[in-house]
Amino acid sequence: MADPSETTQVSESPADVETRELLDAVRTLAAQVGSLQADVHALRAEGGALPAQGDAHGWDERPVASQQSPPWVRSLDSPGMRRPGVPWLVLEIAFLVAVAVIAALARLDPVVIVVVMAAAWGLVAAAEWANAREAAKREASLLRSGLAAAVVRDDASWFGPPVAAPTTVRPVLDDETAARLPPVEG
């Protein structure tokens, strides 16, 4: 009688072959990752400087494009020097208080104090009027310069009359839960 191990041939199933191939690929990949990790550790241990310009890799060969602003930004004038912000209200109140204190220290008659305070208030009002007029002149010169006109030319729809949304007549139904189709627009 023959030995069963001699007569029986054991063949591998296709699933076993695929599993073995997959394990071999994972082992190869693990060896490559180990090699790369060793290279990284060696580079870190060297602590060398960055590569020289001649040693640049392919991604550094492209020239760096400078960012330019859009043409409409370049067409604008540069802003002028701004005057420092002055707390006008505080200065005006301080001026009126100073005039009142000086008038009181001068022991003026009450009627004269009222006239002096009215004159001081008139000076403050004249200063406010002059500042408002100057601001209006600056705004008008801006409009005349064409800067604002360029913005208006870009989108003139802002100045058109408002367009009313079309209204639809909804028929009155007895049952409000009934399904309805939207009206046919002609």
Image: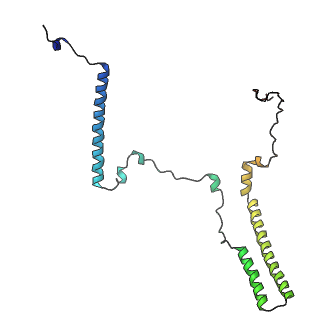
Closest to the observer, 86 or 74:
86
Question: Which residue is pictured at 29% across the width and 30% down the height?
Answer: 23
Q: Identify the image quadrant of the C terminus.
A: top right
Q: Residue furthest top?
A: 1
Residue 180 seen by the camera: no
Q: How many marks?
A: 0
Question: Which residue is pictured at 75% across the width and 59% down the height?
Answer: 143
Q: Is residue 58 left or right of residue 111?
A: left
Relative to residue 1, is residue 143 depicted above or below?
Answer: below
Q: Is residue 77 left or right of residue 129?
A: left
Q: Is residue 172 left or right of residue 27?
A: right
Name the image quarter holding residue 50.
bottom left
Closest to the observer, 29 or 107:
107
Q: Give the image location of residue 16, x and y in percent.
A: 29, 22
- Which scheme is used to colour this image of the protein? rainbow
Question: Which residue is pictured at 63% across the width and 55% down the height?
Answer: 73
Q: Residue furthest left?
A: 1
Q: Identify the image quadrant of the N terminus.
A: top left
Name the image quarter holding residue 104.
bottom right
Q: Give the image location of residue 51, x and y in percent.
A: 34, 53
Relative to residue 114, is residue 53 depicted above or below?
Answer: above
Q: Give the image location of residue 76, x and y in percent.
A: 66, 58
Residue 127 seen by the camera: yes
Question: Which residue is pictured at 75% across the width and 86% down the height?
Answer: 101
Relative to residue 55, is residue 179 depicted above or below?
Answer: above
Q: Residue furthest bottom?
A: 107
Q: Give the image location of residue 74, x and y in percent.
A: 62, 56
